[in-house]
Amino acid sequence: MEQNYDFRKVFAAACLGMLLFGIVMISLGSVMPSIIGKYGLDALQAGSLASILPGGILLGSLVFGPVVDRYSYRNLMLFCTLFIILGMESIAFAPGLPALQAGFFLIGFGGGAINGGTNALVADISEGQAGKRSANLSLLGVFFGIGALGMPSLMAGLAAVWPFERILAFLGAAVFIPFAYFLLIRYPAAKHAQAIPLKESFAMIRDVPLVMLGLFLFFQSALEGVVNNWTATFLQSEKNAGATEALVALSIFVASLTLTRGLLAIVLRSFSPFYVLLASIGLLLGGAGLLMAGVSTGFYISALILLGMGAAAGFPVILGYVSGLYTGLRGTAFSFVFFIALMGNVIINYITGIIAHQYGMGKFPWILLLCAGCLLLIAATSVSRIARESVKTTDS
């Protein structure tokens, strides 16, 4: 089929969407204390906002695939951007808790769908070897890191002169800029413009290779989520780090992950994605071990650098393999594995909270080691076979 879109423009749209996802997700976390203070929310009410956001992300991740397979990426990108705008303005001008909850849900739903949709879009326009798809997906992931790293500093600067409501209102209005770009460019055509083959879609549940790739992302997402959510607490309670020092250390993890994904965009074009994945798991195991043994600031900083480097390859490489398994229903397949991945994030984070309450934060590195060990086991037993089949398909 003749290509009717400009690769560079579409790839730029995907990167812009991922950047937007990083910005809005970090922005909400930055203004959360101000929201609690303004509305006098108790722990239960604040907890409802904290749970509605990932709930929206989970639902958005589940539905984006069938939407892009049936109606194309244009509709997804436009509607998700509108949901994010409506969510931010709803929070900025909320008269009470229900409007806040609606705003958090809209941002979570739109963000979750645009996160999955941009990954599927890049996989769609990166036909060819798995290494090329994984390299482009890795480059895409860099833009989430740019948004996640840059936005806290900007928010801190604006907070000195503006209340959080004005920041969110103007930020929401600024999202119309990417909306206009998404509206003007052409995208790959929908693969099933008439109807999605439901039988083939539901058969994914019984597709062992796809399920194993999803299970790999279950532990990959869990490990990343646990590091993001619990590292600062661990460093303060177990390593006697100050609050600012702990947050700086966490930023080092995000920076390490982001820079490594930029490097992988080059490396994966020349080296086997599977061997890159194995090396990454080795770095995860080393980082978790170093975090456990660390007795000084240098130890745990080095551990977080290794963990960031090790976490960088998981999603790009595995999504590259998913892309090769389901070329005709790629969006739906991505939805399937993203849903499994996010469930891992939710479940393992919940278990971590229970373990921390019962046994203390000293068990935190063991949870990371367990996740990394599961990744190694799945890679050795299942991903290795999928990788070999991918090479055979490419060679033939």
Image (tube, rainbow, N blue to C red):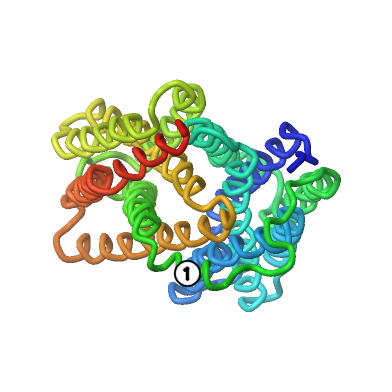
Q: Residue at x 34, y 60 (%)?
A: 208
Position above or below: 125 against 207: above
Where does the image place residue 310, in percent across and percent down from the top left?
Answer: 33, 34
Q: Residue at x 48, y 66 (%)?
A: 50
Depth check: give the residue in front, 140 or 202.
202
The residue beneath circle 1 is: 51
Q: Secondary structure at mark 1?
A: helix
Where does the image place residue 202, in percent across and percent down from the top left?
Answer: 49, 71
Image quadrant where one finds the N terminus: top right
**10 Å crowding of disc 1: few (<14), some (14-19), many (20+):** some
Q: Residue at x 70, y 44 (%)?
A: 161
Q: Quadrant of residue 111?
A: bottom right
Position above or below: 273 against 238: above
> In the picture provided, is 389 more to the left or to the right than 66?
left
Q: Is residue 171 visible?
A: yes
For the image shown, how many numbered marks are present on the structure? 1
Q: Quadrant of residue 300?
A: top left
Position above or below: 247 against 77: above
**Three-letter code for the amino acid on which mark 1 is drawn:** Ser
Where does the image place residue 344, in percent across and percent down from the top left?
Answer: 35, 60
